[in-house]
């Protein structure tokens, strides 16, 4: 068994002035009163609750009559508001497509947007920079930068791909060396990519597991079932990237993502081939990461994604032109994605109902338009569209991520003894999931951040830094 990649970080003793600028609530004892609480376990919402926070922990939770509020506590009346757990999202990036085949390193603005959207813990799903994910993780832990706790993924483990921001693995020995090097540099998880071989993947998994670290993959050359047999911990994009059903697939060769997706579009969620794959994944404890947000931007006749106003004007314009073409169905693939999106949703739902661990993320890549923070809320909405109840969707976006990271004793749910990672929203997302967008305060380790200030600080500049 794995120990889990991240141990609990202490709350920093001091916050930098830059971080303090974003703080709305900072007190040793905080009482949130008259709150509706969605605790993240999937249990029904409870109204008229008091949450007592001391330092970085929740110390009491219950009806007002059962929780005594100490003298001197900072009391915040949350009448009409709901508290949900801080989101734990597992396919995030600190980069964004700024031009054809080029990814700009936008970690400085992205960590603020993630936090503003209610994400208090995230795993980056691969990095194309090397050090930014690791350095930002450490700066956030030290209180120098405002952002979620980060499980920092190393540069991609990839075969020949033509991607100019990725290393090409030479062989199995190189795969081991890369894992060892980046683990020593501070990376806490690994991501394999579309052209890795089974031998390289096996070596990478072995080296990572020796160090108590996990490996995920956006695969193509290696099928989902093969990766499960090799011991992979997670598969990105759930079944959207599976090549298991491609006829005459050559081992270790990616037949093209579109070829795999055509088979997924045609797959019967009640058929034996799919059920067999689900059983293999569940039996091997392989989690699947849902990233419906990025696929939504590829599909025709979908709503415009939220948060575009934070982008640099040039990037916003670039995406809006793409959006017009995709909406009209004139781009290659947009009609295909229109059919693939609901099928992918149905398969994810079936996987979770069969006992699989479905986790959530956003993947701010593609052709743009997946905006950190905003997209995390949208992902939860899309899980509801996929057939989960709002309470289940919130649990996938909080508790399931925490379980995957091996940190669910500390984060992912709201209970006495847990870390005070909480999102206060206006309204009631248990009955109207879009209320998850109305974030008022984001508590991370008991410190309440102001989402409006975080967003204002980057508005119109996301694309520069
Ligand atoms: Zn990604």
Image (tube, grey):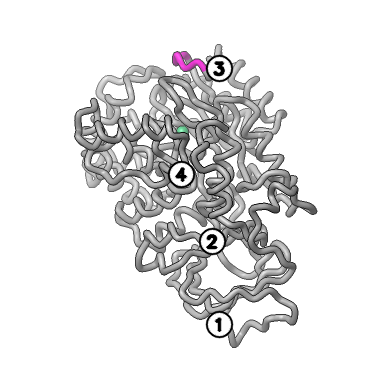
Magenta-highlighted residues: 160-164
- Residue 432: x, y in percent? 35, 65
Q: Which residue is mark 4?
A: 361
Badge 2 density bin: few <14, some 14–19, many ≥20, Cα 10 Å: many
At 55% from the left and 82% from the top, the residue drawn is: 63
SS under mark 1 = strand
Query: Which badge, 1 or 4, is on the more N-terminal residue?
Result: 1
Q: Which quadrant of the rendered structure holds the N terminus?
A: top right
Q: Is mark 2 within 8 Å of ligand 1?
A: no
Q: Is residue 50 above or below residue 201?
A: below
Badge 4 density bin: few <14, some 14–19, many ≥20, Cα 10 Å: many
Q: Is residue 463 above or below residue 49?
A: above
Query: Which badge, 4 or 2, is on the more N-terminal residue?
Result: 4
Q: Is mark 4 within 8 Å of ligand 1?
A: yes
Q: Is any atom of residue 285 visible in this view? A: yes
Q: Which residue is mark 2?
A: 423
Q: Quadrant of residue 268?
A: top left
Q: Which residue is mark 1?
A: 63
């Amino acid at each position: 068994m794995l120990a889990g990649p991240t141990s609990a970080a202490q709350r920093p003793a001091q916050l930098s002035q830059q971080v303090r600028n974003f703080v709305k609530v900072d007190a040793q004892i905080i009482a949130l009163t008259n709150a509706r609480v969605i605790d993240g376990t999937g249990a029904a919402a409870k109204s008229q609750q008091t949450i007592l926070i001391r330092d970085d922990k929740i110390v009491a939770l219950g009806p007002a009559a059962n929780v005594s509020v100490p003298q001197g506590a900072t009391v915040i009346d949350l009448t009409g508001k709901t508290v949900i757990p801080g989101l734990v999202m597992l396919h995030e990036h600190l980069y964004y497509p700024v031009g054809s085949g080029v990814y700009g390193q936008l970690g400085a603005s992205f960590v603020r947007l993630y936090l503003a959207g209610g994400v208090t813990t995230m795993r980056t799903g691969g990095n194309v920079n090397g050090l930014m994910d690791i350095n930002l993780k450490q700066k956030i832990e030290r209180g120098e930068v405002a952002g979620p706790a980060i499980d920092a993924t190393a540069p991609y483990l990839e075969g020949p791909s033509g991607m100019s921001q990725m290393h090409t693995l030479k062989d199995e020995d190189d795969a081991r060396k890369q894992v060892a090097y980046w683990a020593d540099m501070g990376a806490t998880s690994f991501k394999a990519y579309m052209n890795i071989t089974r031998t390289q993947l096996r070596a990478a998994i072995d080296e990572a597991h020796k160090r108590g670290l996990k490996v995920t993959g956006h695969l193509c050359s290696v099928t989902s079932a093969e990766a499960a047999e090799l011991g992979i911990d997670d598969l990105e994009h759930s079944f959207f990237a599976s090549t298991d059903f491609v006829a005459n697939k050559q081992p270790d060769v990616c037949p093209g993502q579109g070829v795999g997706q055509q088979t997924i579009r045609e797959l019967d969620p009640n058929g034996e081939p799919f059920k067999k794959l689900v059983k293999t994944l569940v039996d091997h404890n392989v989690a699947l990461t849902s990233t419906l947000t990025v696929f939504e931007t590829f599909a025709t006749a979908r709503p415009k994604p939220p948060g575009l106003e934070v982008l640099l004007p040039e990037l916003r314009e670039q995406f809006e032109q793409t959006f017009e073409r995709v909406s009209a169905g004139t781009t290659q693939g947009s009609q295909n994605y229109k059919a693939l999106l609901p099928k992918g949703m149905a398969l994810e739902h079936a996987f979770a109902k069969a006992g699989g661990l479905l986790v959530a993320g956003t993947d701010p890549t593609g052709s743009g338009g997946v905006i950190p923070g905003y997209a995390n809320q949208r992902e939860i909405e899309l899980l509801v569209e996929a057939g989960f109840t709002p309470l289940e969707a919130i649990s996938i976006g909080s508790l399931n991520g925490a379980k995957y990271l091996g940190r669910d004793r500390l984060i992912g749910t709201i209970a006495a003894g847990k870390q005070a990672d909480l999102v206060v929203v206006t309204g009631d997302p248990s009955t109207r999931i879009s209320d998850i967008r109305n974030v008022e305060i984001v508590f991370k380790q008991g410190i309440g951040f102001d989402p409006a200030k975080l967003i204002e600080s980057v508005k119109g500049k996301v694309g520069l830094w």
